[in-house]
Amino acid sequence: MLRKLLPLLILALGIGGFVALKATRPKPDPVVPQERVWRVETVTVTPAVHSPVLNLFGRVEAPDRVRAAAPVAGRLLEVRVRDGDLVAQGDLLARLDPADLEPRLAQARAELTREQLRLTHDRQALEQERALLALAEAALGRSEKVQSQKLGTASDVDLAREQLARTRLAVTLREQAIAEHPARLASLEAKLAEAERDAARAQIKAPFDARIGTVEAGAGDQLQPNQTILTLYPVDGLYLRAKIPGSRGEELRAALAAGQRLTARANHAGRPFSAVLARLAGEADARGVDALLKVEPGSDLPLGAFVDLVLQRPAMPDTIALPFAALNGGARVFAVNEGRLQGITVERVGEVMEHGASEVLVRAAGLGPGTRVMITHLPNAVDGLKVQEVPERKTAAAQPPIGSATAERAEHMP
């Protein structure tokens, strides 16, 4: 009997001990849930006047580039410059063979002299022909008088009349030749001036301080009329042609009409230079409208070079410069109000360069003076999210923009 009851007794004691231990166990403290707090960086913003910038890509051009060509067919005697040479105004660049131009000049002078002599001879001949006309008229009168007295024949009168008509025709033709003399003289003088001009152009000289672009002919070449010998462009007449987005075209056109001076900063081969917006093209395409910016003198840029430039746009009031990390979704920022995030929709009006850093320029009615804006990029940022501000920066422009590395370092506390 004892052997049968012993296992039951042990089982009862184990159950009793378990119940006693469970009844006497200590009670844990109740768990109180806590909201996570995200540490973020903020800046205090104040709307002000900012000048946004526009990043462009331009090409160096010379609208006043000159193409020096042969005035007439002839042989090129010499070329004194090479590609890229700097020349001063009046320097001799190339020379054509004078033997190809002097015969035309001599012929034009001879024809002009002949016309002047012809006028003198025509005037002398006119006096003689008028005297002959008077004699012919007198002879006709005598013939008619003799015929009226029945002493002459009708054929004598006809011969006198024929002679008078011929004399009158000669006088008329001579007077016409004298009347046409000024027109013939002007035509010959024009031909002489053209020949003198071509002869003077045989020596091709620089019309201004310039740089040689390309030399397309060499000494000894037989040139045709208007065949290009070389090209040159003024060293202080360089422009940058850049494509402006269509959304910015009217803004810049209005600024130019108002007389605003919009400058651009650029760099070529490690050398910085500046340019001023001169005008906008009258035609546009799907990519935008062309803008021409005059390069400041002394930049010494090669024609056709491509450069990156930053164009200053007209100043915009009531705008705020923020790091790009402050944007969420492209057109939304978060203000910090009593430790909570508050989303504000903003209008992006461009970019601005502040202390060497590029920042986004925004405008919003909800961003008043003294508003603290989060500049740490939080992927999970929503309205009402609890945050803790780290030591505040003085201004948004005085610090470089905060990138994704800052967001990755953001800590949260239980």
Image: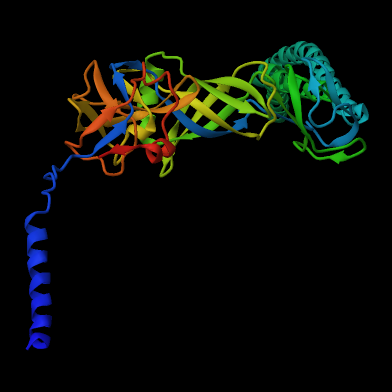
The correct choice, above or below, for 208 with respect to 227 in the image is: above
Q: Which residue is drawn at 48% across and 19% down?
A: 355
Please state which of residues 307 and 35 is positioned toward the viewer in this rendering: 35
Q: Is residue 402 visible?
A: yes
Please state which of residues 79 and 214 is positioned toward the viewer in this rendering: 214
Q: Position of residue 140 (x, y in %)?
A: 69, 19
Q: Can residue 146 be seen in this view?
A: no
Q: Position of residue 278 (x, y in %)?
A: 50, 21
Q: Position of residue 3 (x, y in %)?
A: 12, 87
Say which quarter of the image contains residue 392.
top left
Q: Where is residue 102 in the image (x, y as percent from the top left)?
A: 89, 25
Left or right, 214 with respect to 288, comes to: right
Q: Residue at x 80, y 40 (%)?
A: 224
Q: Residue at x 68, y 29 (%)?
A: 269
Please state which of residues 411 and 26 is positioned toward the viewer in this rendering: 26
Say which quarter of the image contains residue 9.
bottom left
Colour setup of the view: rainbow
Say which quarter of the image contains residue 364.
top left
Can you say which quadrant of the picture contains the C terminus?
Answer: top left
Can you say which quadrant of the picture contains the N terminus?
Answer: bottom left
Please state which of residues 90 and 81 is positioned toward the viewer in this rendering: 81
Left or right, 370 with respect to 136, comes to: left
Total tally of numbered discs in the picture = 0
The correct choice, above or below, for 384 with respect to 45 in the image is: below
Left or right, 343 with respect to 156, comes to: left
